[in-house]
C-alpha cells in the first residue's frame, strides 16, 4: 500500500511524519521504523513521527528514533507537528501531555515539568542528579534531567573540542543508564547564552535536539550559571528556553516543512 508522508525539520533535526488519522497505517515495528529512517536505503530521518487519534488530546504523537526504538519525547518534532496542526495543539505523548502554539515560522511549546529524581531519569542506582560523581575522560560532574526522555548534561570550556562522536555512544550505552541516555555537552557563553552539542540516544550526533536544549537550560538555571529565558545555540540554530524552579519548561523556536511524498509500505519490511 502507498503511504503519504511529510518531511520536516527543526533546526536541521529532521523527521518523516506519518499521519495515521488520514490513512490506515499497519502496525510499525522497530525494524520497519529503522528501515524507513535509514538515510541510504530508506526515506531518511533522525526520528520517524506517527500521528494518531487521541481520547485525551487533539492527537497523539509517537516518536521512533533512527534506530527504530520508540521514545517519550522529541522537542523539535513537537514544534514541527504543531506547525502542521496550524493552531494551538494539545499533544499526547508517552512522556506526558504537551501544549504547543504556532508562532511565526515555528512554535512555542509547554514541555511540562522536568524531573530530577535518580529513578525518574532513570539511573541504575541512587545518586545525586544535581552533581553526579561520575566521569568519562574530560567529561565530569554532570547533571541528569528527565524532560519526557533521559538526558545527562556536561559543562565544558569548549563543546567543539570534545570528541562526542567517540564519547557519546560510550556514555549513551553505559550501564548507569538502564534506558540509555541523550548526551549533552554544553559551554555557557554568558548568563543569556549556551552553546550545545548533543549525541542523541538512538540517533547519534544531530543538528539540534529540542529536549536536550530544555534539559541543558534547566540544569544551567539550577546551577545558577544562566538566567531564564536563555538562548541555546545548537549546530543547526537557536532555541529559547524559559523555566523557573517548580514550573514547566517553555521551548520556542523554528519548524520547517521540507516536502511531501509517498512510499510503498512493503518496500520497508
Ligand atoms: N533521541 C531522543 C529523542 C529525540 C530527541 C530530539 N530529537 C529532540 O528534539 O528532543 C531520545 O531518544 O530521547
Image: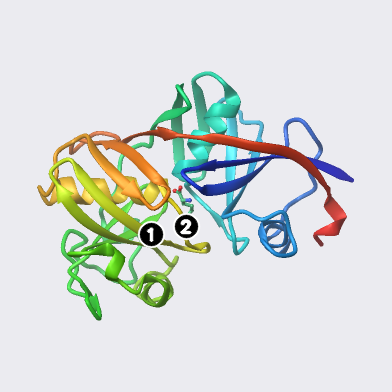
Q: Is mark 1 within 8 Å of ligand 1?
A: yes
Is 165 placed left or right of 56 in the picture?
left
Q: Secondary structure at mark 1?
A: strand
Return the mark for residue 131: none
Residue at x 56%, y 48% (from the top left corner)? 14
* In this view, 117 is above or below 73: below
Residue at x 16%, y 45% (from the top left corner)? 221
Q: How is the image coloured?
A: rainbow
Return the mark for residue 206: 2
Is 189 placed left or right of 82 in the picture?
left
Q: Earlier in the sequence, mark 2 or mark 1?
A: 1
Residue at x 38%, y 69% (from the top left corner)? 177
* In this view, 85 is above or below 60: above
- Could you tell me if residue 56 is visible in this image? no
Between 254 and 91, the one nearer to me in the picture: 254
Residue at x 27%, y 52% (from the top left corner)? 195
Q: Is mark 2 within 8 Å of ligand 1?
A: yes
Q: Residues within 10 Å of mark 1 (few under 14, many from 20)?
A: many
Amino acid at each position: 500500500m502507498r503511504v503519504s508522508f511529510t518531511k520536516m525539520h527543526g533546526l536541521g533535526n529532521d523527521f518523516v511524519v506519518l499521519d495515521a488519522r488520514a490513512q490506515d497505517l499497519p502496525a510499525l515495528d522497530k525494524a520497519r521504523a529503522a528501515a524507513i529512517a535509514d538515510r541510504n536505503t530508506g526515506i531518511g530521518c533522525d526520528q520517524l513521527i506517527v500521528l494518531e487519534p487521541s481520547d485525551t488530546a487533539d492527537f497523539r504523537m509517537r516518536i521512533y528514533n533512527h534506530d527504530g526504538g520508540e521514545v517519550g519525547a522529541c522537542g523539535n518534532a513537537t514544534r514541527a507537528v504543531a506547525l502542521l496542526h496550524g493552531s494551538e495543539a494539545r499533544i499526547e505523548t508517552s512522556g506526558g501531555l504537551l501544549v504547543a502554539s504556532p508562532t511565526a515560522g515555528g512554535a512555542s511549546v509547554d514541555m511540562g515539568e522536568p524531573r530530577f529524581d535518580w529513578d525518574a531519569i532513570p539511573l541504575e542506582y541512587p545518586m545525586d542528579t544535581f552533581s553526579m560523581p561520575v566521569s568519562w575522560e574530560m567529561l565530569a560532574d554532570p547533571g541528569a534531567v528527565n524532560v519526557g526522555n533521559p538526558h545527562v548534561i556536561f559543562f565544558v570550556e569548549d563543546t567543539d573540542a570534545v570528541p562526542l562522536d567517540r564519547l557519546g555512544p560510550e556514555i549513551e550505552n553505559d550501564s548507569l543508564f538502564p534506558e540509555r541516555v541523550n548526551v549533552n555537552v554544553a559551554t555557557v557563553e554568558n548568563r543569556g547564552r549556551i552553546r550545545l552539542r548533543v549525541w542523541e540516544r538512538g540517533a547519534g550526533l544531530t543538528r539540534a535536539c529540542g529536549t536536550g536544549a530544555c534539559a541543558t537550560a534547566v540544569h544551567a538555571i539550577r546551577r545558577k550559571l544562566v538566567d531564564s529565558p536563555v538562548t541555546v545555540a545548537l549546530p543547526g540554530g537557536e532555541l529559547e528556553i524559559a523555566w523557573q524552579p517548580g514550573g514547566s519548561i517553555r521551548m520556542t523556536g523554528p519548524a520547517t516543512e521540507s516536502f511531501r511524498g509517498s512510499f510503498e509500505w512493503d518496500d520497508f519490511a
